[in-house]
Every structure is written in C-alpha cells, then in structure tokens.
Image (cartoon, helix red, strand yellow):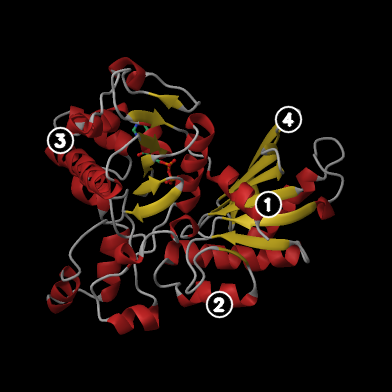
Amino acid sequence: MKVLVCNVGSTSLKFKLFDMPGDKVLADGKVERVGRTDAIFHYGNRETGYTIQLENQSILSYAEGIRRYLNCLTDPEHGVIPQVSEIERVGFKTVLAKGFYGIHELTAEVLQAMEDYLIVAPAHNGPYLEAIRQIQQVLPGVKLVGVFETAFHTTIPQARRIYGIPYEWYEEYGIQRMGYHGASHGYIADVLTEQSGGTGNAISCHLGGSGSLCAIQNGVSVDNSFGFSLQTGLIHANRIGDTDAYIIPYLLAQGKSVEEITKGMDKQGGLLGISGVSNDLRDIQIAAEGGNERAQLAIDAYCAGIIHYVGAYYAELGGLDHLVFTGGIGENSSLVREKVCGAVTHFGIVLDAQKNAQRSAQARIISAEASKVKVWVIPANEELGIARRTYEYR
Ligand code: ADP
C-alpha cells in the first residue's frame, strides 16, 4: 500500500511517500514559504537518487504545494508511481482534537473537534485544518488519517491525567494532561523494541524546537511532560514550559492584555526569553562560551528541567533500563547530554565521553559498558511512525 505522510507547518509542507509494509521511502518532498511567490520546492526520488530544488516559486496555497508534489510523483521520467490513484492513504501528524485523542479518520466531525481546540494549539491546528481541507479536494476519495500527537499517550494512567481542578472543567472542557510528541516517542519505543527486544523502563527525551520527556513502560507511555497544551513541561525554544497558572491573573491585573500575555508565553519565552540571545541552542552555546551570563542561565535552566523530569520518571517507573535522546538538540548537543547524564550518575548512568562526542546518523549507545542504564541517541523519524500507524489503522 502506498501511504503518503504529510507534515504541515505554518508555512511549510513536508511529504514522504512510503511503500507499506516494509517501511520503504519512495520519494520525499518539501515546500517552504507556502503562500508566497518566493517559495522553495524540493523533490527527491529515493529510488534513483534524483533530486530537484526550485527557488522563487509561486506556491500560494497548500493545495498548490501538494499538486506540485503529486506531479513529480507521477512524472514519467523522475516519478515513482504511474498515477495518483496508487496513493491509498494520507497520514497526518495532527496534534489535538477535543474528544479524539487516538488515531482517527479525518471526518468532518474530527475536523470540527480540531476546530474546538484551535485556541489550545493555534500554531498547529490552524495550519493542519487548512491543509487537510485543501488536500481533501486534491485527493478526493483517499482515506485521510490523523495520527494525533496525543495518541501514544492515551495509556497514561488517569491519576496522572487528571489535574486538581473543579471536576466539571475536566468533564465539560476536557482539560487534562494530554501528552504530545506521540509520533516521536512511539517511534523510540519501536526502535528499542526492535534493537533490545523491548523497552523495559525507558525515558525518551525529545529535545527540539519544542521538547518533552516520556516515561515508557513495556512499550506504552505512562507519563509525558506536556500537559493540556504544548506550552507546558520543559523550556522550549520560544514557549515557556512549566510555570505557575497564577502569573496570568496577576499580569492581567497589572494591565497586560490577553494578547500580550499569550505572545509572551508562546513567542517571547523559553530559551529566547531567558537568554535574550536566540531561540536556537547553537547560538546560545556560543554566547555562553563568550561569557554571556543569561545565555549560560538558559542552558542551565533547560538542562535542570530535563534532570527534574528524569528524576520524576525514574521514581514513577521504579527504575530505568534505557535513557534516550532524540530531536535536533537531543541528537546534536553532546553538551546537553553530558550535563543531564552527569547529574544522574546515582541512577547507574555512566556516559562514555568519547561515544558522546561522536556523530552518527544511526541509532547508537553512548553509555559506558559499566553503565546499568543504557543511554542512546536515536535519530527522530516521526514520519515512519506516522506511516506505520496510518497503514495499520482499521
Ligand atoms: P523542530 O522541533 O522544530 O522540528 P528540531 O528537532 O530539528 O526542530 O530541533 C531544532 C533545534 O535543534 C535547533 O533550534 C537547535 O537549537 C538544535 N540543534 C541543532 N543542531 C544542534 C547542535 N549541533 N548543537 C546544539 N543544538 C543543535
């Protein structure tokens, strides 16, 4: 079965066409700056190695972006399928829909439920709703499947899902700990199972533009550092992470508007807010090396948050077999891995400094032989996770 995986950003579209089962990628594609006349279009045929990148393209809508990609897929010379009707399913890394937390066909009812939570996940639900509606028109009759980022976390026990809020807020509005980054953490569970025969007790640290830790027990999620929204948990690139809900009424009373507060929380906070330098850890590391104290504080606070959740999940899991780093920061920042692992040596975690410093695109173990806990770096592959779940969906 040909499964197209579509990753939607606020101004970008990324595609991968899979042949399932077998996890084979046939072709990938990317459109950057959707909605502009200087869009960048990329297509790659994974079979032949042919790639093309076109700049200054007029791609004014998601529909136009996907049409371009479909034309490449069916191109007689560089395509990989004879006709578009070969595509049986499209899988989306959708984020949140009220009352639909697993893997669902994207019916009108599910799209309405995404709309209902637009205010909780505006940066994600808005672009996805627009792209899905346009793709429905470009690919009529094809089954569209939403592998919600909450799906892997539906196994979190109720005692960790519930907040200490008036119970009717939970019943009426669905306010609870959701957990996100499900495609990434679910893929990590798959890799540990394939390579170690099971996950046992594992902590998966997805550290990218946004970050979360997931406690995994025997293959299923039992906790995640995200809460009801994606604003919570770790400090993110621009988003605040865990804070005290009472700063909001306090700031309102000081005369700040709701718009100013939400902008502060999702655009001006996180690593950028603390460092005042950048939302990119690479820039912050350089500034800290140059003696910038706020940059150093941002790195320290970021790592302290990760260490906090590692400790919490160690206690919840009752021990630890695997600690995994993934995502742009998790895969590339040996400094963050060193600081985190160095703080929890009493859990039986011993890093091999040389292995930690090495780079590789493969999943690898970076702990010392003597380490009781295996420490891994596993490159994120959320698209494969989505392709598998979309293919399996019944
Ligand atoms: P997203 O969450 O947006 O998909 P990624 O998972 O690709 O992003 O992570 C992006 C982040 O990874 C960048 O903002 C940067 O902070 C970090 N990063 C990438 N390479 C390095 C590196 N060599 N050292 C430190 N941080 C890095």
Dot placed on the residue nearer the N-terminal end, 3 or 2: 2
Question: Residue 302 appears in which quarter of the rendering?
Answer: top left
Q: Secondary structure at mark 1?
A: helix
Residue at 65 percent of width and 58 percent of height:
393
Residue matched to label 3: 292
Mark toward the viewer: 3 or 1: 1
Whether residue 209 is visible, yes or no, is no
Q: Amino acid at mark 3?
A: Asn
- The numbered dot on residue 112 is 2
- The crowding category of the residue bearing disc 1, from other C-alpha atoms within 10 Å (few below 14, some 14 to 19, many at least 20), is many
Disc 2, SS: helix
Which amino acid type corresponds to the residue marked 4 in the rendered image?
Tyr
Does the image show residue 183? Answer: yes
For the residue marked with disc 2, what is the amino acid? Gln
Name the residue carrying label 4. Answer: 50
**Which mark is in front, 2 or 1?**
1
- Mark 1: amino acid: Tyr
Separation of residues labelled 4 and 2 (CA atoms): 40 Å
The answer to whether mark 3 is within 8 Å of ligand 1 is no
Up the image or down, 222 lies above or below 286; here it is below
Quarter of the view holding residue 263:
bottom left
Between disc 4 and disc 1, whose residue precedes?
4
